[in-house]
Image (tube, grey):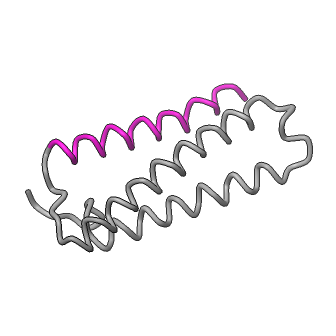
Amino acid sequence: MKVFIGSPGTVSGLMLRIYQCAFAAASIAVMVSASDFSSYTAFCYLIASMGLQLLWSFGLACLDVYALRRKRDLQNPVLVSLFVVGDWVCSFSLRTPSKLL
């Protein structure tokens, strides 16, 4: 398999996952800091989907750290397919609450 920039198990992939994790945490912090955020259903769904994104990104960042430390190759087609499906589910969950507004 050809290694692309941002692929799982690379330094650039690790940096992208860390950025995803940081931006998800920042999004949650901003939404929670809004006054009376819990009375808006869309905010509650967005916070839940951002929590999912945060956990997914953190888990894959940990996997990237493991792969880099152990010099493991994560370019297995089955693993890459799992990452693609997981990212697709996270992106779909982020798009769903906007239809509620």
Could you tell me residue 91's position as x and y percent?
Answer: 47, 40
Question: Where 100 falls versus 50 (above or below)?
Answer: above
Identified at 73% across, 29% down, the residue is 101
Does the segment drawn in magenta span residue 95?
yes
Does the segment drawn in magenta span residue 11?
no
Query: Is 14 positioned to the left or the right of 92 in the image?
Result: left
Could you tell me residue 6's position as x and y percent?
Answer: 30, 64
Q: Residue furthest top?
A: 100
Could you tell me residue 4's position as x and y percent?
Answer: 20, 64
Identified at 57% across, 64% down, the residue is 22
Identified at 79% across, 49% down, the residue is 32
Q: Residue furthest left?
A: 1
In front: 93, or 101? 93
Identified at 86% across, 50% down, the residue is 34
Question: Where 49 falls versus 32 (above or below)?
Answer: above
In front: 71, or 11? 71
The part of the chain drawn in magenta is 78-101
